[in-house]
Image: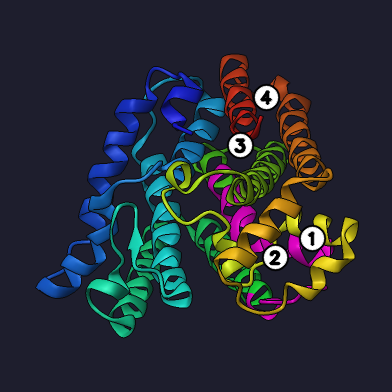
């Protein structure tokens, strides 16, 4: 999904270029190695969805016009948190590639990747602090939520009895929290009142939930060529996501295959079971429910938001669900 294409807002391309330039400046360091490592994934690109949400929230408050420097700073802060978390995730997952390039842990080593991730989080905190104590405190709490969600997911690795509640709680922390914060910061730096901020927060939360659930569905339904990684990679790593949890509920015999690493034939058999019998449709229904709630959060506060931007953000939500449909 391309945020630029989905949102269709005229100033977004130029403002994202400003974000990109500021990102490159944020990862520079007098130490040549640290600067190279910290800038590794910035140079690899990415969807920049979280900065796009910060910009979109600011447009919703102030209209679809080029934003103030403070909004760019907020957008950079949330993307730096995201990038720092990716460095750490790749160490946890022992990933070899990220965004089509060798991961930092693969190119250098785990220690370098962890420290570079910490450096990015520190730079994010510095940028947030320049926007005031409220923004800095919000970003600090969000980093804590990312950690909580990731720890909860690790706690349930290879857990064939992982519950839907545990899954949704992990997603709320590791993905939806930063989506919500990306939106809220866009409103905060524009001086939006508390009810409006809460509406943006709910929008971002439900959008993040939908985004992650759809990603998890695609991991079980798409081909390796479509994904750019092995199909069923979450299953291989022992991360049992919502379609798998629903499939276990429909086919209790799946528990016998789970709880351990799978070979290729076992993986193919489990994926075939997950794809049949309605589990994927059930998971898609949950994603659609979050998509509906995201739109309702925006439209419920529409009197305070630019209607053109509300419709653009609604298209973004629709684009997430279409990825599965």
Q: Are marks 3 and 2 in contact (CB under 8 Å)?
A: no
Which residue carries the number 4 mark?
304
Q: Of the residues under marks 3 and 1, which one precedes in the sequence?
A: 3
Q: Are marks 4 and 3 in contact (CB under 8 Å)?
A: yes
Specify whether 21 is left or right of 234. Answer: left
Q: Nearer the viewer, residue 276 or 101?
A: 276
* Circle on res. 245: 1
Q: Of the residues under marks 2 and 4, which one precedes in the sequence?
A: 2
Mark 1 Cα-neighbour bin, 10 Å: few <14, some 14–19, many ≥20: many
* Circle on res. 192: 3
Above or below, comparing residue 92 to residue 9 in the picture: below
Q: Alpha-carbon distance for marks 2 and 4?
A: 40 Å
Q: Alpha-carbon distance for marks 4 and 3?
A: 9 Å
Q: Alpha-carbon distance for marks 3 and 1?
A: 40 Å
Residue at 79% of width from left, 60% of height from top?
A: 245
Say which of marks 4 and 1 sits in front. Answer: 1
Which colour scheme appears in the figure?
rainbow
- Magenta-highlighted residues: 154-183
Q: Of the residues under marks 4 and 3, which one precedes in the sequence?
A: 3
Q: Nearer the viewer, residue 223 or 282?
A: 223
Q: Are marks 2 and 1 in contact (CB under 8 Å)?
A: yes
Q: Magenta span has 182?
A: yes
Mark 2 Cα-neighbour bin, 10 Å: few <14, some 14–19, many ≥20: many
Q: Alpha-carbon distance for marks 3 and 2?
A: 39 Å
Secondary element at image label 3? loop
* Circle on res. 240: 2
Residue 100 picture location, percent across and down: 30, 52
Q: Of the residues under marks 2 and 1, which one precedes in the sequence?
A: 2
Q: Main secondary structure of the magenta part?
A: helix
Secondary element at image label 1? helix
Residue at 58% of width from left, 51% of height from top?
A: 219
Q: Of the residues under marks 3 and 2, which one precedes in the sequence?
A: 3
């Amino acid at each position: 999904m391309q945020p630029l294409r989905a949102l269709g807002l005229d100033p977004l391309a130029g403002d994202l270029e400003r974000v990109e330039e500021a990102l490159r400046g944020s990862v520079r360091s007098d130490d040549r190695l640290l600067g190279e490592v910290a800038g590794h994934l910035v140079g690899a690109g990415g969807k920049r969805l979280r900065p796009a949400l910060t910009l979109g929230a600011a447009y919703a408050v102030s209209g679809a016009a080029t934003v103030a420097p403070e909004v760019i700073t907020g957008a950079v802060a949330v993307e730096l948190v995201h990038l720092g978390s990716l460095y750490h995730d790749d160490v946890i997952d022992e990933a070899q590639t990220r965004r089509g390039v060798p991961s930092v842990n693969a190119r250098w080593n785990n220690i370098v990747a962890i420290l570079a991730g910490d450096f990015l989080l520190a730079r994010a905190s510095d940028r947030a602090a320049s926007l005031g104590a409220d923004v800095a405190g919000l970003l600090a709490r969000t980093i804590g939520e990312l950690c909580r969600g990731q720890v909860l997911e690790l706690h349930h690795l290879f857990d064939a009895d992982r519950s839907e509640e545990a899954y949704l709680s992990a997603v709320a922390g590791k993905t939806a929290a930063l989506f919500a914060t990306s939106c809220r910061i866009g409103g905060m730096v524009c001086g939006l009142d508390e009810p409006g901020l809460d509406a943006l927060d709910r929008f971002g939360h439900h959008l993040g939930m939908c985004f992650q659930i759809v990603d998890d569905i695609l991991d079980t339904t798409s081909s390796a060529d479509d994904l750019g990684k092995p199909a069923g990679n979450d299953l291989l790593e022992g991360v049992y996501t919502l379609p798998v949890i629903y499939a276990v509920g429909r086919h209790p015999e799946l528990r016998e295959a789970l709880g351990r690493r799978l070979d290729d034939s076992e993986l193919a058999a489990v994926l075939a079971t997950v794809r049949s019998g309605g589990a994927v449709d059930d998971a898609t229904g949950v994603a659609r429910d979050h998509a509906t709630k995201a739109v309702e959060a925006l439209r419920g506060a529409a009197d305070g938001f630019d209607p053109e931007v509300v419709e653009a953000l609604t298209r973004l939500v629709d684009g997430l669900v279409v990825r599965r449909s």
